Image (spheres, rainbow, N blue to C red):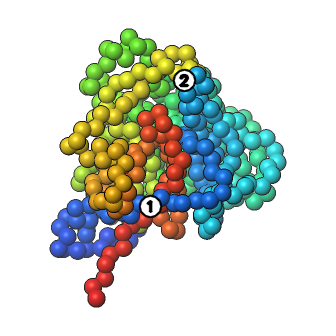
Amino acid sequence: MEPPVDCLISVPKFGPPPRTDPSAGGGGGLGRGRRLVVSKLNTGGDPPSARGGHTATLVGDKIYLFGGHELRGADKGFAYHNAVFVLDLKGRRWVPFKKQKGTPAAPRYGHTASLFRSRIIIFGGKGGPNLYFQDLNALDVDNATWYKGLSRRGDPGARFWHSSNISGDHMYVFGGACGSTLLGDLHALNLTTMEWQELKPRGRAPRPRVAHASALANGYLLIHGGMARTVLEDTQAEASALNAADLATWYLGDLHALSLSALTWHRLRVQGDLPTPRMGHTLAPLGNSLLLWGGWPHRNSTRASMYNPDSKQQELMMASAPTDSDPTAALLLQSEEPQEIPLQDAAALCSYTGEWSPIFVRGKTPACRYGHSQSETPSGVVVLGGWTSPVPLMEALLIQEEEEETAS
């Protein structure tokens, strides 16, 4: 039976209950927080250039990376990509993709890529100043062929930094932005008939947002965080008028669940150490939890302005302002010594208790990032690329749950 509309519900369960360790304190054996091992995935071959806003789709034992963009300097502007790169997880090597047939999707970032059978379905994105896509493309990895979706009645409008998730034979697209328009609509694509439909669920929908994170859990579509403002391309005068209170209202930290069977939005009952509001993060299953990784938070952020050679405008950027006493600083300082510290830009949401818990990492602390990709694999979660401030990355990280020591 579905809960009443707009009531608080627990996080949908999709994994086994957490191990209980009364001596650890806290609920369900979480103790002071989840412990993860983060290691750099040393890869061979010819890797893609550093970038953010790309997608990475797991198909079998390979990850297919598409799109993204990078800033190549104030005089060169942004480079937008559409080449396909393949990371072979067994060999830990970037391998060439087959010669492709058909017309590839245009270069873009901020798009989505979702797997349906053997096809990676790419929707939306941004390909340059005022160039927003609403096209539908599919790459069949079995025969290396690109397919172009036909424009159909009910198509979602052009957008980027939206979310897209496939459940059964439907793809659900939520939110995003197009120019100065922030979006909060929900569309479903029937992947059998290729017909779009705008959905009007019951309940209180999440407010319009961009660069949020999404995940599926036991028949629910989860939406977390994002930004309640469109592209940061304000004039210098507007940027100067902003203050910390203004910035804080842009970033969201709420969590919503859409029941796909009843088409009803619900608010979620959560507890614990809630992660700070953020944008550009990822959310993916890891064990009996959902792993939230990265993102750009409003906490400890200051205003900065950088000239965008593409838009010919001053672009409002956010700059981190760590202090010696702030644990976030340890992430930005790239400590070379293995250590265990609270990772302020990551958290775990237990699917049974509905409790957010901090994450402790063993190993070299990775750089803070946003606009990265996160892929769930049998060995753990693989994170690729992203940006740290305007600097693009392309290191590969493997995130695994720390194994418990057994008593001898």
Identity of the residue drawn at 28% across and 60% down: 340
| Tag of residue 405 | none
Describe residue 356's horizontal placement relative to residue 391 as left or right: left
Describe residue 56's horizontal placement relative to residue 365 as left or right: right
Q: Residue furthest top?
A: 237
Identity of the residue drawn at 51% across and 39% down: 392
Q: Amino acid at mark 2?
A: Ala
Q: How crowded is the residue under tag 2: few (<14 C-alpha within 10 Å), some, or many (20+)? A: few
Q: Quadrant of the C terminus?
A: bottom left
Residue 14 place in picture, x, y as percent: 42, 64
Q: Quadrant of the N terminus?
A: bottom left
The residue carrying mark 2 is 74
139 or 314, nearer to the observer: 314
Describe residue 8's horizontal placement relative to residue 95 as left or right: left
Q: Is residue 5 visible?
A: no
Q: Secondary structure at mark 2?
A: loop
Q: Are marks 2 and 1 in contact (CB under 8 Å)?
A: no
| Tag of residue 39 | 1
Q: Amino acid at mark 1?
A: Ser
188 or 389, nearer to the observer: 389
Sequence-earlier tag: 2 or 1: 1
Please determine whether, in this image, residue 207 is positioned above or below residue 405.
above
The quarter of the displayed image where residue 302 is located: top left
